[in-house]
Image: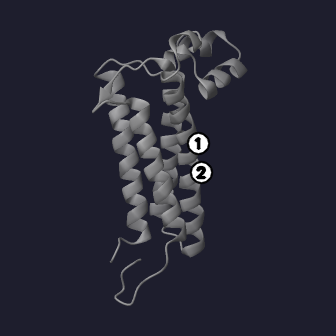
Amino acid sequence: MILPNPRITFLLMFVAVVVLLGAAFYLEYVAGLEPCPLCISQRVMFLGVGLVSLIGFVHNPGTVGRRIYGLLVSLWALGGLYFSVRQLWLQNLPEDQVPACGPGITYMLDAFPLYDVVRTLLTGDGNCAEVQWTLFGISIPGWATIGFVGLVLFGIWQAFRTGRDNNGGYR
């Protein structure tokens, strides 16, 4: 089977991230959903995947560079996977075990020490346990989890794929 060359694969990863972030911004600014701290952390991880993919596309590296960029994509996606799974875990806690809701991130940045803001972004709060939207019964962090798993696998595949086949295509 002939597959796209590594440069096009990085472009496809970048486009996928743009679509995912576009959907997140649509849900925030058009649908009016307020992102929780873990949602913001997931967006940062998607942004990291997108930037590494864009750099990989522009750079068009050789085998070593492709492996480095592929592994970096996977690392960013693994970070995002942690945050999305954490949010799914919070959403499935019994109501009496859900952490207390905190103030919005904008207020926290103005009023709290940076350490407290970062801690909330890494662990979430009660706002993260609220399911605000679903598609086919899957919540936003569920869809993010699917996206991050796909990006981890794509990054690993990109890092360890073999070179050209006899027909000039990529395997």
Which label number is shown at residue 75? 2
Q: Quadrant of the N terminus?
A: bottom left
Label 2 Cα crowd, 10 Å radius (few <14 / some 14-19 / many 20+): some
Question: At label 2, which amino acid type do we have?
Answer: Leu
Furthest toward the bottom, the residue is 166
Q: Residue at x 39, y 30 (%)?
A: 140
Q: Is residue 10 visible?
A: yes
Please say if 108 is above or below 83: above
Question: At label 1, which amino acid type do we have?
Answer: Gly
Please say if 81 is above or below 137: below
Please say if 23 is above or below 96: below
Find numbered disc 2 in the image and state the secondary structure of the residue it sits on. helix
Q: Are circles 1 and 2 on residues that touch, CB within 8 Å?
A: yes
State the image coordinates of residue 25 (x, y, percent, origin top left): 36, 30
State the image coordinates of residue 120 (x, y, percent, origin top left): 62, 21
Q: Residue at x 49, y 23 (%)?
A: 92
Which label number is shown at residue 70? none
Q: Residue at x 36, y 49 (%)?
A: 16
Query: In the figure, is residue 30 to the left or right of 66?
Result: left
State the image coordinates of residue 64 (x, y, percent, origin top left): 60, 72
Query: In the figure, is residue 171 to the left or right of 26?
Result: right
Label 1 Cα crowd, 10 Å radius (few <14 / some 14-19 / many 20+): some
According to the image, what is the colour scheme of the structure? one colour
Query: In the figure, is residue 137 to the left or right of 40?
Result: left
Q: Is residue 102 visible?
A: no
According to the image, label 1 marks what residue? 79
Disc 1 versus disc 2: distance between alpha carbons?
6 Å
Find numbered disc 1 in the image and state the secondary structure of the residue it sits on. helix
State the image coordinates of residue 101 (x, y, percent, origin top left): 55, 10
Q: Quadrant of the C terminus?
A: bottom left
